[in-house]
Image (cartoon, rainbow, N blue to C red):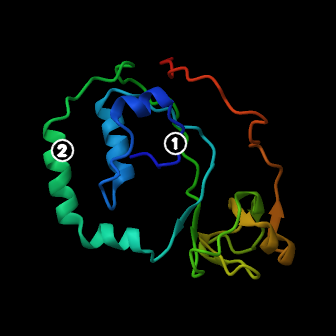
Amino acid sequence: WCNVTALIPKEWHDEIGGFDESMKTWEDVDYHWRMARAGKCYIRIDQELMVYRFYSGVRREEGLSDWQSVVEYLEKKYERIEVVGCPCRGGRARVIKKPPPVGRITEERPGALYDDEEYVMIEYLHPNRGNHPVVGHVTKTKYGNRGGGSKFLVNIKDVEAQPHLFKQLESGVTAPKQPISSTESPVAL
């Protein structure tokens, strides 16, 4: 499964018919399953590029509470979808190294979100090397269980308020200055 924020060439999106907007939930999973069945390869970028925000929101809860009808719908839907082989024919994984997960679990209301620009990569300076809960002093963001020496994304407000715990690292990821116009397909190496 691939997160919904993956960059997909528009031709691929159109070829599989886009998202199934009739689905109340799991539409992102369905989307990527159809990409895989259409023989579209993915390449993972070995950097932490997103933060998944967990809320007790309606859509997530709907998906969990009504999962049986969603599974029935998908079973019927996939009976008529032809499976196409991947053009790269498998082989070794394109990227082996897996970065540590970056999660953001928060108690705040979904309407009060922070912009991505407000997050920076840090080194956690706590002397305790064992994993323990890390919470931002200003934003009250729960950054998960971390040990001293861990590297993860933190809101800049928390970094400024807790410089004894968070050392900002140089950013290795920059956004392109202009839209990417090329829609070349990935090439197997």
Q: For mark 1, what is the residue? A: 6
* Neighbourhood count class around disc 2 (C-alpha, 10 Å): few under 14, some 14–19, many 20 upward: few
**How far across and how far down the image is residue 36, in percent?**
33, 34
Q: Amino acid at mark 2?
A: Lys
Q: Which mark is residue 116?
A: none
Q: Residue furthest front?
A: 22
Q: Which residue is mark 2?
A: 77
Task: For mark 1, give the secondary structure.
Answer: loop
Q: Nearer the viewer, mark 1 or mark 2?
A: 2
Answer with left or right where residue 47 lies relative to residue 34.
Answer: right
Instruction: Tell me residue 182's x, y (percent).
Output: 62, 22
First in sequence, mark 1 or 2: give its number.
1
Compared with residue 80, is residue 51 higher up or lower down, i.e. above or below? below
Q: Is 129 situated above or below 23? A: below
Residue at point 52% right, 33% down? 95
- Could you tell me which residue is drawn at 43 percent across and 34 percent down? 13
Residue 101 vs residue 37, the one in the foreground: 37
